[in-house]
Image (cartoon, rainbow, N blue to C red):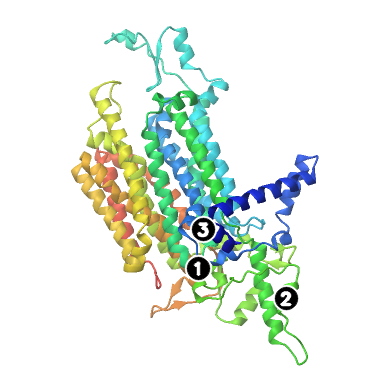
Amino acid sequence: MEKLHEYQGITGRLHQLRDNIKEKYSSINQENSPNIFEKAKTTALDQLKGNASANVDYSHIYRYKTRAELVRVSAAVMGIEFSYAAETAFVSPTLLKIGVEHQHMTLVWALSPLVGFFLCPILGSFSDRCKLNMGRRRPFIIILSIGVFLGLILVPNGENLGYWFGDIDPHLQAAAMNTTYNTTYNYLNIMPHRATASKSESETYVKTSHPWGIFFTVLGTVLLDFDADACQSPSRAYLLDVCIPEDHAKGLSTFTIMAGLGGFFGYSMGGLNWDETEIGRRLGGHVKAVFTIITFIFIACVSFTITSFTEIPLWALSTSLRQKEKCQADNASVNYGTINNDDDCKSDKNYVELTPPMPSENFGDVKDNFGETSFTENPETLMQATNEVEGDISLSQNNVEIQSLSHYLLSIVYMPYSLRIVCLTNLFCWMAHVCYSLYFTDFVGEAVFNGDPRAIEGSIPQRRYEEGVRFGCWGMAMYSLSCACYSLVIDKLIQRFRAKTVYVGGLLFYCTGMTLMALSRAKFSVIVFSWTAGVMYSTLFTMPYLLVAHYHSMGTFEVDGSGTAKLESGVRGLGTDVAIVSSMVFLAQFILSMCMGVIVKVTGTTTAVISTASFLSFCGALSATKIIYLDL
């Protein structure tokens, strides 16, 4: 089918898609199920039937992927970065508008990482054990995408939901008092036409309260922040599962390119003035217009990804390995007068052919793509490990046992040294990046433009601060663009200079850029040195996961004294390890949410934010020198 599509081109693919839709529609009409709930129940139960996908062709897993195919697999992260850009740009102003104090803002940002740090690795373990026919990664992409969708709905509409639940609408209150409403600082403005006001008049400012609006907006923020970060783990694991090891570097770089483009267009979309457009007026204003458009973009991107390639379900992976071992044992004991048993093995109703379509050393071993790496010293160890798996997690259709959930959870605690160093390095990287991404616009507004966010509305310091925040958004757009550009060449840099040089060099490059930005505090430095942040983001988005995938494909996490890879007995899940490394973003955000306010208060300047980012990046570079790179 893939060869046929190559000859037919895009027209042939569209015709095939049309035929598939017609066939699906016809099958639905033939069933004529009177009860929609019964039909949903049947569909859900079919997902657990081991032989439901026995006739699916998985040959696409074992071939090289084109750049266009990798773009489609990585489209989900582009939608995630669109939503993340909207979150970082508008959540803080939205919370301030409905009455959240500045000192409580860090607590709101700490809620999501507090949950995600513990929950994300557990979700990765569940993903490794998911038995659904649609695969192990896509169900979790869909579930977490629903959370992102709810967050995109709640954040811009939390205030209106609060009014439905009983919050006082200041616009109606202002109309009743024949006054105007200041939407920036959430105050009722008495006699707004006066240029000055007496003390008694200034005391008539009444601050409104939005308890329900705050609740729904904070809930949306937590859902959006947690699910957007957590959804990246199964998205990466899905990319690694459907690609051969030789495509991992190219695939991860494509993944980062899509993330950079999503951030660039997301921040740029927020910089447009939607209030002056017909779309903005119809959708209810600037913030609601941005979130509504990004919601549709997010749904399209996720749909594009989950319909790209069929995953090999867990039961098929287990069946193939067991059947392969059984056939090898039968063929080894062939006696005089017997015929070859290969056809008998394949005639088994649960047999699934997972062999690459053409034998070549370039495609790697089939086991490289299973997402679960086993380490064996000898055949006896393999047979012993096979017999020791727990029987309560068996697949009923095939009577095949897989590793228990407790095993994967213990693998989170008992990590090999190499994985611990990768996690530590990624923690430093994320802390350095979070300093930039969450607090950068405030640094530009105060330190570069000499503005004051607490100044009187309309005063020169306040206008300078607002101008600086907008200018900082364009700097962040440049960092996203540089991330996409650098990701185009990072895989080639790895091939030329090796992974260690690229990893350490990228972190030192960011360290140098942040140091120069903190020293200069000029407008040009905001734009120019923001490009170093894109190099950093591309590095932390690519290198840790390339190393984890390389460990799994090599079948080892350790080396002996001579630097030779050392095999050990044990099983680790790729999804679990990817989730462990990804969870460092939650820990980094939580630590900085607790500490950054104190650091700024002690130093008395927001320049400390950029200086801290530079220092943490240098620590990450030192940690990266201790990583075990094997031959990468």
Q: Nearer the viewer, residue 486 or 377?
A: 486
Q: Would residue 2 be visible to someone looking at this image?
A: yes
Q: Which residue is mark 1?
A: 552
Q: Residue furthest bottom?
A: 336
* Mark 2: secondary structure: helix
Q: Kindly report the distance in space between the C-alpha atoms of the residues bearing marks 3 and 2.
A: 31 Å
| Residue 309 x, y percent position in the rendering | 57, 57
- Residue 275: name its quadrant: top left
Q: Kindly report the distance in space between the C-alpha atoms of the residues bearing marks 1 and 2.
A: 29 Å
* Mark 1: secondary structure: helix
Q: Nearer the viewer, residue 17 or 406?
A: 17
* Mark 3: secondary structure: helix
Looking at the rendered structure, the kind of residue marked 1 is His
- Crowd tier of the residue under label 2, counting other residues whose Cα lies within 10 Å: few below 14, some 14–19, many 20 or above: some
Residue at 52% of width from left, 72% of height from top? 364
Q: Which residue is mark 3?
A: 239
Please count the marks in the image.
3
Q: Would residue 432 be visible to someone looking at this image?
A: no
| Residue 454 x, y percent position in the rendering | 30, 26
Label ID, residue 345: 2
Q: Which of marks 2 and 3 precedes in the sequence? A: 3
- Crowd tier of the residue under label 3, counting other residues whose Cα lies within 10 Å: few below 14, some 14–19, many 20 or above: many
Q: Which of marks 3 and 1 precedes in the sequence? A: 3
Query: Which mark's residue is nearer the viewer, 1 or 3?
Result: 3
Q: Kindly report the distance in space between the C-alpha atoms of the residues bearing marks 1 and 3.
A: 14 Å
- Residue 136: name its quadrant: bottom right
Looking at the rendered structure, the kind of residue marked 2 is Cys
